[in-house]
């Protein structure tokens, strides 16, 4: 294979210098970019099976161990945030009137502080668990999210 020599470009016919298409003043502030990156890093993928495991732990007849209460509360709050986000993005309130009430309830229970008393904390965890379960069931029913794999039939196309 032979190489072809390209002709040299004449200095008088230089191409114009590249200019950034967006003026620097119009670029987003560094704080906005960092906030967006933090949100992307904090994102967790949808995992209905894990959600239902945590909901089952919370709603079980045997309450969760006292040392797990804070961790479960944080996870359930995260699930509620994701579910509300999915509900709003897919506009399920236009498809089913129950969605508006369930979204409001999920936001309300998510924003409540975890009580200091263990028994009251378990009650609060159960309220969050029911909110996750009911909103998840509605979103699954309306096909806004996929149902957990453990409940899907094996072998169906």
Image (tube, grey):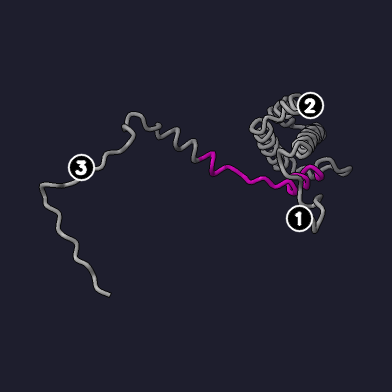
Q: Which mark is residue 157?
A: 1
| Distance (Cα) linking label 1 and label 2 | 31 Å
Q: Which mark is residue 16?
A: 3
Q: Residue at x 79, y 52 (%)?
A: 150
**Spot occupied by residue 115 in the image (x, y as percentages of width and height):** 74, 30
Asked if residue 39 lies in the magenta stretch, the reply is yes
| Distance (Cα) linking label 3 and label 1 | 56 Å
Circle 1 SS class: loop
Taking 39 as reference, is 152 above or below it? below
The image quarter containing residue 69 is top right
Asked if residue 8 lies in the magenta stretch, the reply is no
Residue 42 in sight in this render: yes
Given residues 135 and 3, the one toward you in this image is 3
Q: Which mark is residue 98?
A: 2
Label 3: few (<14), some or many (≥20) within 10 Å? few
| Distance (Cα) linking label 3 and label 2 | 60 Å
Taking 59 as reference, is 5 above or below it? below
Given residues 86 and 42, the one toward you in this image is 86
Label 1: few (<14), some or many (≥20) within 10 Å? few
Q: Residue furthest bottom?
A: 1
Q: Is residue 107 left or right of residue 98?
A: left
Q: Which residues are magenta?
A: 38-57
Circle 3 SS class: loop
**Spot occupied by residue 29 in the image (x, y as percentages of width and height):** 40, 31
- Considering only order in the chain, which callout, 2 or 3, is on the residue closer to the N terminus? 3
Q: Residue at x 73, y 46 (%)?
A: 48
Q: Residue furthest right?
A: 61
């Amino acid at each position: 294979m032979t190489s072809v020599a390209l002709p040299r470009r004449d200095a008088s016919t230089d191409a114009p210098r590249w200019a950034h298409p967006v003026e620097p003043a119009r670029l987003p502030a560094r704080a906005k970019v960092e906030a967006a990156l933090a949100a992307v890093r904090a994102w967790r993928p949808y995992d209905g099976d894990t959600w239902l495991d945590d909901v089952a732990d919370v709603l079980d007849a045997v309450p969760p161990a006292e040392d797990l209460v804070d961790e479960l509360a944080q996870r359930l709050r995260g699930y509620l945030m994701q579910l509300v986000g999915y509900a709003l993005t897919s506009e399920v309130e236009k498809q089913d009137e129950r969605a508006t009430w369930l979204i409001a309830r999920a936001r309300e229970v998510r924003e409540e502080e975890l009580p200091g008393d263990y028994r009251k904390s378990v009650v609060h965890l159960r309220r969050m668990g029911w909110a996750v379960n009911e909103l998840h069931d509605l979103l699954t029913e309306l096909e806004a999210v996929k149902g957990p794999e453990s409940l899907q039939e094996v072998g169906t196309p």
